[in-house]
Image (cartoon, rainbow, N blue to C red):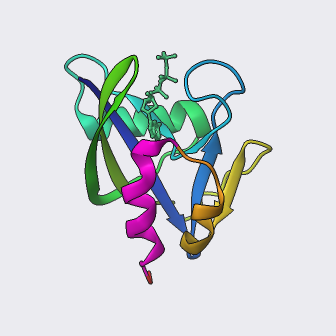
Amino acid sequence: MVPVVAGVILHEERVLIARRPPTGHLPGLWEFPGGKVEWGEDRRAALSREIREELGIDVEITRELMVVEHAYPDRRVAITFYLCSLPEGTDAPGGETLRWLRPDELEERSFPPANAELIELLKGKDW
Ligand code: DGT
C-alpha cells in the first residue's frame, strides 16, 4: 500500500486542481496537488513538501478531510486528503496546468477514480 497525501487548497471559495503530465501513470487527469509520502516521513510534512515542490508555496493545513484506499491495476494507494489554505500575503499560484474551480465545477473534469468520493463531498460544501 503506497501512502499518498493530497491538498484541497481553498481560496476565495475555489479549490486548486492540477493536471497530471500527458504521459506516465493516469496521464492528463486532473488531481489535487500532492504525492507519495516518503519512508518514515510525517504525512503533513510530506504534503507541505510536495506542495512546495509542485507549486513553490507554503500552505496552511487546516484539517484532514478523508482517507481513500484505491487499487489501480499496478498499485494500491491510501490517499489522505487535507483541507488547506493560503497564508496571508501568499499569491494564488496559476499556470497552464492549474485551475481554480468552484466545488460544483469539479465534476466536469476528469479525475482519477480514487477521487470520486472526495469530489462528491466537496460538491455539497458551502464554505
Ligand atoms: P511515479 O510512480 O513516481 O511515476 O509517480 P506518480 O505520478 O504515481 O506519483 P504521485 O507522487 O503523483 O503519486 C500519487 C498517487 O496517488 C498516484 O498513483 C496517483 C494517485 N492519486 C489519486 N488521486 C490523486 C490526487 O488527487 N492527488 C495526487 N497527488 N495523487 C492522486
User: Who's the residue at 72% across and 26% down the image?
Assistant: 22
Q: Residue furthest left?
A: 40
Image quarter of the N terminus: top left
In the rendered image, the vertical position of residue 97 relative to residue 73, given as above or below: below
Q: Which residues are magenta?
A: 112-125
User: Who's the residue at 40% across and 39% down the image?
Assistant: 48
Residue 36's image quarter? top left
In the rendered image, the vertical position of residue 77 relative to residue 85, given as above or below: above
Q: Residue furthest front?
A: 73
Q: Could you tell me if residue 84 is visible in this image?
A: no
Q: Could you tell me if residue 112 is visible in this image?
A: yes
Q: Assess whether residue 117 is covered by the magenta stretch.
A: yes
User: Who's the residue at 70% across and 48% down the image?
Assistant: 98
Image quarter of the C terminus: bottom left
Residue 27's image quarter? top right
In the rendered image, the vertical position of residue 110 relative to residue 62, given as above or below: above
